[in-house]
Amino acid sequence: MTVVVDADDDYHITRAALGAHDVANGVLAVHPTVGVSAMAALAQDILVALGKLPTAVVKEPLTATAMWMITTAWVIGMDIRQLVILRAHRLPRPALARLVQLAADANTSLTLVWHARPPARWEGLLPTATIRILQAGAAPVAADEQQPPVAAFADVPEQQCSPLMSKQRQEQARLVMCQALPEVPQSNVLHFRANAFRALSREDFARVDLLYTSAMDAACAFLSAHPDYCKEIQTSAGVDLHGDGKESGDRDVPDGQVAERLKFALDDLAVQVGGLPSASASLPRPWEDREAIARFVTELVVAAPSHAHTVALLHGAQAGFLLHGIHLVIPANPEKLGGPGFVDPPLTPAVAEQIRSHIIDPVRAGALAAFLATGLSAWWLSLISMCRLAPDASILRAYTPFKIGYPIPLWARDLLAAARAFAVLQNCDDDERFLATGIGVGGQTLADTAQRCGLNLREFMLDGHRDDWRLQMRCFWVALPFHPRDHAVRRSPACT
C-alpha cells in the first residue's frame, strides 16, 4: 500500500489523482462523499466510481458487509489494478482497514492520498498493512509499480486461397457492424446474394455485401486452421477421378451405400448440392467436429447488432464453406429458435453498459449478460457451473446435446467475471451453479433484471425447452476442395 502525504492539500495533487481515473485501463480514483462516515457509504462511492448509477446504488437495501462483498466482486471483475482513495485522512480506522482488505482480496494496489499532517505512527493506524510513504510530488499519484504485460496477438492462420477483401474493405466491414441494416431477403445460400442485390438499394446492398464477403474470408481462415480440412486437402491433392465420378478407391462402393450417403444432401439445397463439381461416391459425408463448427459460427455472429447482420454473415459463411466443398446447413427461420445472433435485444456495447450501470448485484448482471450472449434458455443457463467460465471470461462452456463454447464479447466479460468473483468470495465450489440465483424460477429474476435495465426480453426466449438454432445446424462434405490443391498445400502452414 502507498500513502501519498499531501499536508498542504495541494490542488494539483487532487487534480492529478482524479485525472488518473481510467476504469478501462484498470485505474480507479475515488473521492469519498464528504461528511458521511458509514462503512457502506464508502463502498457505494467505489461502486459509483466504477460507473454504477447513484440512484441504483442507493436504493439497494444491503448491509455494509454485503455491499463490500459486491464492491470487491466488481473491482475483481472489472480488473482494477490500481485503487486511489482521496481524502483518506478523513476516513475512520475501520474504513481504512476495510480498504486494505479490499486491496488484498482483489489483488490490487492501494494508494491513499493523505491531505493532512501524517500521524506519529502509521503502524498504529494501519497495523496489518505494509506501507510505503511518498511525499507529495515525489512520484506520480497513480503510478503502477508493475504494469501488466501486453498480450501479443496470435498469428492469424494463412488462408488456403487469397482473401476476397482488401484491408480497406475489412475496415469498412467493421464499420458496418455499427450501422443499421434493412431487412434482408429470406433466401438460401445459393440465391441470397442475388436476391439481396435485387431487393436492396445500392448503398444497402454494398453494406450487406461487405458482411457477406468478410464472412467468406472468415470461413476460409477457419478451415485453413482446422486439421480435418488440412488432412482432406492433403489426401485429395492426388485423387484420380474416373469418368464415372468415383474415386479410384470408391469404384466398388455399392449403390445402396452411395444412396445412403446422399441422404445427407437431400435438404434445402437438394439437387443444387448434388451438382457441385468433383463429387464422388464417398461424398457427401458428415463433418465430424460439430463443436468446432458451432464455435466458429458463434464467434462470427455473437457481436451482430441485428438479425439482418447475422443473416448476412451466416450466408457469407455458407458460401465460403461451399467454395471449399463443404455444405453448412442452417435451419429455416433461426430467429424463431433463438441463439447467438438472434437474441433480442443483442448484447451490444450499449446494452452491456446499461446492465453494468443499472445492476448492482453481480450475479444478476452476469446472468443477463450470459443470457444475451449465448441465447441459451434460462433452464440450460442455470445449470452451468463456475468452472465452465474461462479464466478471462472469454468463453462460457455448456453441455447441450454436445459441448459448445459460447464466446463472450469483450465488452461484456467483466460482467461474468464479477459474477464468478462474487461466488468465489462466498466460498462456492467450482462445480456450483454460479448464475442460478440471477435467473430464478422460469427466468423470472432474469426478466426482472432486464426490465430494470430498460430491456424487454421476448417471452419465448425464457422457454426452458427451447433449443437454439445451432443445435439444429448440420455440416457435411459434398465435394472435393476446389482451390488449386497443390497451391493450397504449399501455402498453408497448418497443413504441413
Image: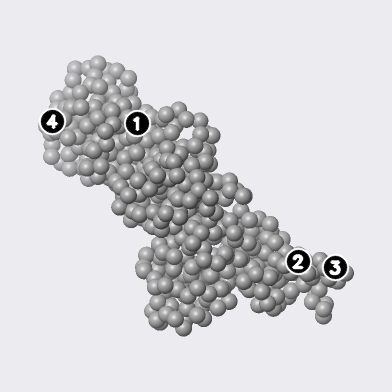
Q: Nearer the viewer, mark 4 or mark 3?
A: 3
Q: Nearer the viewer, mark 4 or mark 2?
A: 2
Identified by mark 3, the residue type is: Val
The residue that appears at 22% across and 17% down in the rendered structure is 121
Looking at the image, tell me whether mark 4 or mark 1 is earlier in sequence order: 4
**Mark 4 vs mark 2, CA separation in Å:** 77 Å
* Res 82 → quadrant: top left
Dot 1 corresponds to which residue?
69
Residue 76 point in image, percent of width and height: 38, 37
Identified by mark 1, the residue type is: Met
Secondary structure found at label 2 = helix
Looking at the image, tell me whether mark 2 or mark 3 is earlier in sequence order: 3
- The circle on residue 35 is 4
Residue 34 point in image, percent of width and height: 14, 33
404 w.r.t. 337: above or below: above
Looking at the image, tell me whether mark 4 or mark 3 is earlier in sequence order: 4
